[in-house]
Amino acid sequence: MFLLPWFAGFFGLTLGPAVASLYLSFTDFDLIRDPRWIGAANYVRIATNDPKFAAAMGVTFFYVALAVPLKLCFALAIALVLNRGIAGLPIYRAIFYLPSLLGASVAIAVLWRQLFAGDGLVNKFLAIFGVEGSSWISNPSYSLYTLVALSVWQFGSPMIIFLAGLRQLPKEIYEAASIDGASTQQQFWKITLPMLTPVIFFNGVVQTIDAFKAFTPAFIISGGTGGPIDSTLFYTLYLYQEAFALFRMGYASALAWILVLIIAAFTAFAFLSQRYWVHYGE
């Protein structure tokens, strides 16, 4: 009886729409006419005759490959600093976590666009030193890196998890290593990093899935176009264009299921590979 609301939400809001989108991915559906069964034609077109699909995949994989490691490294560095027992730790922790709460919002994306515009604050700061900055957002050579910078700025969530992991490491091991003459660098590479691999694994999986799903910053900063020259055309943004700009719901459903399979394949690979580099227990 108590589980009925959960079952209603699961079947009505999760499983039901998922099954419906799987069916629609094999149809031609434009929201006006009834869905028309076309078999695997949508998937065939994606694989053989859709240059924008290839462009969106390239942008998304580059973003994931660059943003996730940078964010995790930055989060770990800040967590190591905070783990030294500095005064006012709760305040610093709250300040650093705040961008994770605000970073995916529309307001922050708009602010980011103003910061990196041709006459934005970043270029005004560079002008103080006599450096003429580029129009970071409208230049296809730099536009994607502004989105990577926005992602790295949202390091608070993995930082909190890293800090919790660091607090659980036994101090006796560090004391024994110090007595044996191990330097701080040696302790980090030989003790801290191996014992922190379960936390790195968790953060890596979660942040990678989030990066594959990134949508709001690219939509706001590019004005929903993925420009300039498709340089910020994230996969989710391309999916949105197909579904809600061109009303090709069947094709967009096929794109969505391909993204699901990509994320599932990555997650499965991560879990299968953890036995070789993640150290649990002793």
Image (spheres, rainbow, N blue to C red):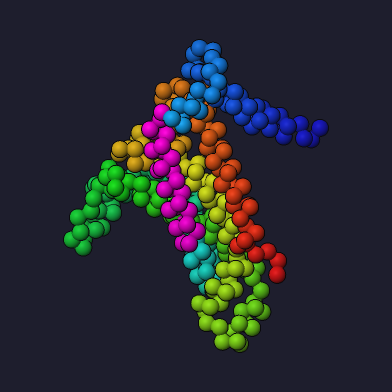
Quarter-of-image position of residue 196: bottom right
Image position of 219 with respect to 115: above or below: above
Tell which of 107 and 13 is nearer to you: 13
Left or right: 170 in relation to 34: right
* Numbered-mark total: 0
Q: Is residue 220 one of those drawn in magenta?
A: no
Residue that appears at 48% across and 62% down = 73
Tell which of 54 and 2 is nearer to you: 54
Tell which of 89 and 151 is nearer to you: 151
Q: Position of residue 175 (x, y in %)?
A: 63, 82
Residue that appears at 61% across and 82% down = 177
Q: Which residues are magenta?
A: 49-74
Q: Is residue 58 one of those drawn in magenta?
A: yes
Q: Position of residue 89 (x, y in %)?
A: 54, 67
**Type of secondary structure dominating the magenta stretch:** helix
Outermost residue, top side: 33
- The answer to whether any part of residue 103 appears in the image is no
Residue that appears at 59% across and 23% down = 23
Image position of 137 with respect to 154: above or below: above
Image position of 177 with respect to 252: above or below: below
Outermost residue, left side: 130
